[in-house]
Image (spheres, rainbow, N blue to C red):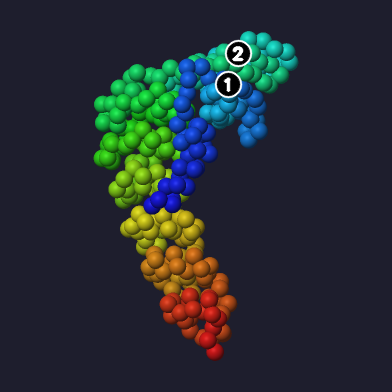
């Protein structure tokens, strides 16, 4: 579990860049810059930085639709020249109010963060704890929502930590995903497992593809291994077509890990010969076909 969770933690940091340990030690005032997004021309890239000593730390950087930067006069941002501008980012956990100068598709200035007391009270009432200001800023950055918290409670998960909520929101987990996984028969034992599922792209739709082939009750660890190795329904169906039906999950994992594909098996079987026992395939792959 440690290795996948380390990967997830790194992925979360990539999605939302929050200073060391992915939780910002944000002061009252935060510097911002706006510029065009290179990934999506329709968006504006907003970067927020806080200063510690004589060093700037990148705190939060993401693309926003102009309408999400409430109050921003887009023409002032895009047109030549320099003029005052302001905008706000308002989310359930808090808001960031910014003012500065901009023009010619660039802007900079400073912002103040204000946590939402009602959201803080929600977390306390659900047994999650009373977050610090820095944690509230992180929850705002990843756009944590009440509906996700409600879905966690409805699915009867243990109360998550603040870091759990940051990870879940950064990965885009919402109530629909949590409910869908439960309907598919998967309510992981812990929030960490739910984070792992979402980070690896294990979805109800992905699970359904295997259920149609008779793999409806694969343990959670098996799903993680299958997803990590990119085992697909097509991979299983390929083995079925050459006579290997109902292979166990651990055998599928072993075959895929060694790149023993149905195509490879067909290539080593002579015309008219029967397929070798599945337990011989690893030896054939590693040492060649016995003569």
Q: Residue at x 45, y 42 (%)?
A: 9
Left or right: 193 in relation to 9: left
Label 1 neighbour load within 10 Å: few <14, some 14-19, many 20+: many
The first of marks 2 and 1 along the sequence is 1
Q: Residue at x 65, y 25 (%)?
A: 35
Where is residue 38? Give x, y as percent: 66, 33
Residue most toward the bottom? Answer: 291
Q: Quadrant of residue 178?
A: top left
Q: Check residue 284 in the rendering and tell me which mark sits there, or answer none.
A: none
Contact (CB < 8 A) between labels 2 and 1? Answer: yes
Disc 2 element: strand
Disc 1 element: strand
**For residue 198, above or below residue 39:** below
Q: Check residue 32 in the rendering and tell me which mark sits there, or answer none.
A: 1
Note whether residue 268 is visible: yes
- Determine which residue is flagged by label 2: 100
Where is residue 137? Give x, y as percent: 44, 25
């Amino acid at each position: 579990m440690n290795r996948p969770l380390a990967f997830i933690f790194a992925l979360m940091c990539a999605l939302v860049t929050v200073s060391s340990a992915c939780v910002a030690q944000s002061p009252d005032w935060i510097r911002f810059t706006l510029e065009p997004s290179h990934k999506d021309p329709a968006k504006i890239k907003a970067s927020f930085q806080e200063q510690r000593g004589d060093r700037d730390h990148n705190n939060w950087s993401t693309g926003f639709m102009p309408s999400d930067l409430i109050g921003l006069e887009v023409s002032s941002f895009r047109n030549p020249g320099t003029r005052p501008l302001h905008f706000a980012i308002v989310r359930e956990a808090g808001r960031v109010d910014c003012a500065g100068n901009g023009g010619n598709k660039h802007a900079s200035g400073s912002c103040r963060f204000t946590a939402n007391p009602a959201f803080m009270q929600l977390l306390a009432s659900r047994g999650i704890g009373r977050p610090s200001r820095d944690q509230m800023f992180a929850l705002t950055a990843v756009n944590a929502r009440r509906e996700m918290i409600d879905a966690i409670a409805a699915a009867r998960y243990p109360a998550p930590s603040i870091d759990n909520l940051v990870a879940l929101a950064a990965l885009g987990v919402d109530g629909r995903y949590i409910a869908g996984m439960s309907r598919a028969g998967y309510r992981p034992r812990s929030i960490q497992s739910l984070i792992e599922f979402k980070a690896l792209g294990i979805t109800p739709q992905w699970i359904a593809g295997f259920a149609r082939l008779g793999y409806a009750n694969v343990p959670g660890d098996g799903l993680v291994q299958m997803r990590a190795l990119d085992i697909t329904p097509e991979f299983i169906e390929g083995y079925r077509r050459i006579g290997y039906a109902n292979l166990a999950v651990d055998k599928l994992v072993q075959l895929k890990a060694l790149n023993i594909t149905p195509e490879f098996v067909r290539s080593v079987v002579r015309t008219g010969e029967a397929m070798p026992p599945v337990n011989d395939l690893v030896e054939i792959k590693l040492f060649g076909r016995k003569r």
